[in-house]
Amino acid sequence: MRKSNLPVDVDHLDRYTGGDRAINEEILLLFDTQCREMLAQLDHLTGGEGDPKSWRAITHTLKGAALGIGAFDLGDAAAEAENAAAKREAALAALLRLREDAAAVYDFIEKFLANTP
């Protein structure tokens, strides 16, 4: 159930953290780092250095992490990317969408941490 038009639905995150701002900040920082690392891995794989199984594993993990924090658009993009593993052109298009949605989440996290979401 999506209630927010923001890149991260903090109400969703609050259901898991009891609304504790410090825990939310810690989770969002961890997600930011994890997401950046996974996108870097996907960049490597679309360069021809990986296999579809690795692509699917990374995008599946990203999907779960994004949905867990309430980054639903990014989670949807990761789900689409998970299905694009076998075709290079589809994977490149999926990676572009992932990067766009991730940029919105990174921006949201930065503002949230500055206390101005």
Image (spheres, rainbow, N blue to C red):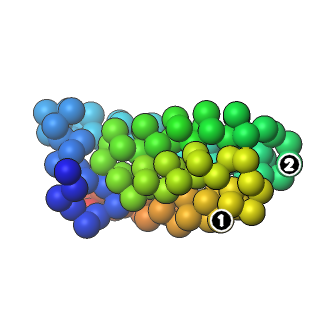
Q: Amino acid at mark 2?
A: Gly
Which residue is at 28% across, 64% downward?
A: 6
**Res 59 quadrant in image:** top right
Q: Is residue 97 above or below residue 49?
A: below
Q: Quadrant of residue 5?
A: bottom left
Which of the numbered marks, if any, corresponds to residue 83?
none
Q: Position of residue 26 (x, y in %)?
A: 35, 36
Where disc 1 sits, the SS reads: helix
Residue 106 in sight from this viewpoint: no
Q: Is residue 73 visible?
A: yes
Q: Earlier in the sequence, mark 1 or mark 2?
A: 2
From this view, report whether residue 53 is shown above or below residue 114. Answer: above
Tell me the quadrant of the picture where the C terminus can be found: bottom left
Q: Is residue 114 left or right of residue 12?
A: right
Closer-to-camera residue (47/30): 47
In the image, 77 versus 116, the foreground residue is 77
Dot 2 corresponds to which residue?
A: 48
| Residue 93 marker | 1
Residue 104 in the figure: left or right of residue 53: left
Q: Position of residue 18 (x, y in %)?
A: 13, 33
Image coordinates of residue 78 in percent, x first then y, are 51, 50
Q: Residue at 44% of width from left, 64% of height from top?
A: 104
- How packed mark 1 is, by other alpha carbons closer than 10 Å (few <14, some 14-19, many 20 or more), is some
Element under disc 2: helix
Q: Residues within 10 Å of mark 2 (few under 14, many from 20)?
A: few
Which amino acid is tagged 1? Ala
Q: Toward which corner of the image does residue 105 lie, by quadrant?
A: bottom left
Please name the residue shown 68% across and 60% down the image: 90
46 lies above or below 25: below
Q: Nearer the viewer, residue 107 or 75?
A: 75
Marks 1 and 2 in Cβ contact (< 8 Å): no
